[in-house]
Amino acid sequence: MSREIEFRGKNINGYWAYGNLSVIKEKLDRAGVGTYISNSSGAPFAYQVRPETVGQYTGLSDKNGNKIFEGDIVAPSGFVSEINQPGIVKWCDKKLCFYVDSIETLIYSEGYKMYFGLDSAIKIIGNIHENPELLKEGAE
C-alpha cells in the first residue's frame, strides 16, 4: 500500500492550499519564482504559498478523521504513552519518518520523541502557524 503524497501551505491572504508542491527557482511563462501548491489540474490553478508554512501530509489521520500534516500540534486522546502534553508533528531525516515532539521536550531537553503509529489515539488541536500560543501554554 502506498502513502498519499500531499502538501499544504498558506497563501499571502492566509488561506490554506492543498495538493502538489512545486518550488520554482527561475521565472517561467506563467509563474514567477516562488513556492506553489496546485491541485491535480496543475500549474494553471496553482497558489503561491509562504515557504515557511509548507508541510507534508503524514499519511495518517487523527481520531476525528482529520489529515495530520507536518507542523500540526496534536494532543493525546486518552493514554498514549509517557507524554501527556501536546506535541508538534515533525519529519526526522535520519529515520525517514514523522514523529511527535512534545512541546516540553522541544523547549527544555533532548528527551523523548513519540513516533507515529498511534494516530487513532491523538487529535489535532492546532498548528504552529495559526496557533503559536499553544507552544507557550505547553511550556508553562
Image: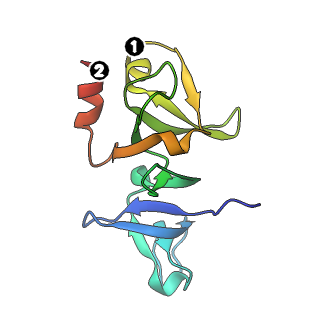
Name which residue lies at 66% across and 37% down. Answer: 93
- Distance between the alpha carbons at the discs numbered 2 and 1: 8 Å
Query: Which residue is more in the foreground, 98 or 82?
Result: 82
In the rendered view, does 128 fall on the left or right side of 33?
Answer: left
Residue 16 visible, this orientation: yes
Query: Which residue is more in the foreground, 56 or 65?
Result: 65
- Residue 29: x and y, percent? 52, 86
The secondary structure type at the circle numbered 2 is helix
Name the residue that disc number 2 marks: 139
Query: Which residue is more in the foreground, 128 or 137?
Result: 137
Circles 2 and 1 in contact, beta carbons < 8 Å: yes
The secondary structure type at the circle numbered 1 is helix
Name which residue lies at 39% across and 13% down. Answer: 108
- Residue 70: x and y, percent? 49, 47
Name which residue lies at 38% across and 46% down. Answer: 124
Q: Which mark is residue 59?
A: none
Quadrant in the picture for the N terminus: bottom right
Name the residue that disc number 1 marks: 108
Name which residue lies at 46% across and 78% down. Answer: 46
